Amino acid sequence: MNETTLRNSMDAAASMRNHAPRACQGRSHWLSGTRLWIYPLAVLIYFAGVALAYGYHVWWLKDPRMAPLAVDFLPFWSASHLALQGHAADAYNLAVLTPIEQRAAGRSIGTLPWLYPPTFLLFVYPLALLPFTLSAPLFLFGTLALFAKVVKTIAPHPHTALIALAFPGSALVLAAGQNGLLTASLMGLGLALLRRRPILAGLCFALVAMKPQLCVLIPLALLVSRSWRALGAMMVGVAISLTLSVLAFGSDTLAAFLHNMALANSYVESGRALMFRVPTLFAAFKLLHAPIVVAGAAQAISALCAAAAVCYAWSRPSAYGLRAAVLVCASLLVSPYLYDYDLTWYGILIAWVIYHAREHGFQRGQREWLAVLWLAPVAGLTIVAHLHVPFTPFISIATLWMLVSQIARERGAQAFITTATLH
């Protein structure tokens, strides 16, 4: 093959990877770098207005109808309180936990169980050394700062931190008082470290196991990619943290956690959870009044397809940004027990797609879809809750399909280049 033919082959392959219309090449995209500060700044101004309105109703008007903020942090703080008192196992006992939560909140707050493994007790152990009103913002804004730092590490840009702070998923976690920013940060950091510091990456993945339903596919990815050091470090990290938690809090906490796993499943299966905030196929079918067998089968298919996508992306060479995004996205499709505040993982997914696009370019419509993902964490509260159309799990499904398809196209393009070079 002569040089001209080879160059034409390579140009054709590049076109397969980055097939934006030629007419659009010269136009500035509405999500271009020069405009990226405008949209998040507008969202932050909106959030500030909402916060001021909330404060006005709570502290000035003393409106009792206003729900308290960060209520999901109450089990964290109350479990820490019990652990500090030497009664860690009672964190799994609603009869003991609820009065402590109510005293911390200063009002009745309903049922807020502690459903985490004893390893997370190690993480929250010092929280009750401070009053709830100080501990909650310290934890939540600290994890927000970590999230912004991790996202900027993956996709460095002058406006990255601003976009991460304005991310609706971040606001949802702050309002709910949850740990979604923490788990997303650990996942993103582990993936960022994996190629150069695999042992540290494995330890980060071990910490993600504080939410077992989110880390199921991580060992599979490390296994099929033969990342032995990271996989070994993850397994050792989980074993050490579990051993330390049992030594610190007693084996009763492990038994109580295993018992309460059935309670967590029952909230979703019975529909007692706010199903419009559960972005899984199981919840979607339940909202459509499907039998539990049908909903369970749909969720099982979702999990199997997610595992297959991870195997496809990680078992053979592919662009690291895309395979990282596949793992993040697929991890959200495994468990039926998932809440909208866990969709902070979309922020890490977006960062990895941008990481890849900085070198290879954006696919047609990809930036628009990233904007959808950026807004998606609040879709359950703002759209599904009112229209009763459970579309949120299909956002993850569609995203995973796009990522796997892009990997397939780029592998095909690379194979084309290789064949052309050899001939």
Image: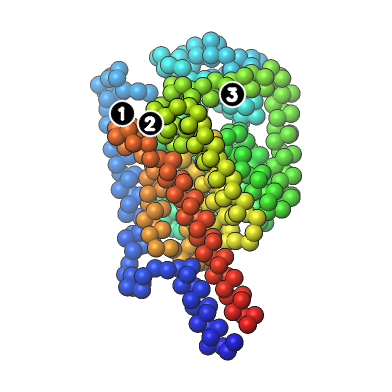
User: Marks 3 and 2: which is nearer the front?
Assistant: 2
The x, y position of residue 20, in whole percent, is: 39, 68
Label 3 secondary element: helix
How far apart are labels 2 and 1 at the CA level? 37 Å
Residue type, mark 1 in image: Gly
Q: Residue at x 44, y 63 (%)?
A: 362
Residue nearest the viewer, comparing 416 with 252: 416
Looking at the image, tell me whether mark 2 or mark 1 is earlier in sequence order: 1
Q: How many numbered marks, from 0 up?
A: 3
Q: Residue at x 50, y 28 (%)?
A: 293
**Which residue is tagged 1?**
55
Q: Which mark is residue 171?
A: none
Q: Can residue 166 be seen in this view?
A: no
The x, y position of residue 327, in whole percent, is: 57, 48
The x, y position of residue 347, in whole percent, is: 47, 47
Label 1 secondary element: helix
In the picture, the quarter occupied by the N terminus is bottom right
Residue nearest the viewer, comparing 250 with 332: 332
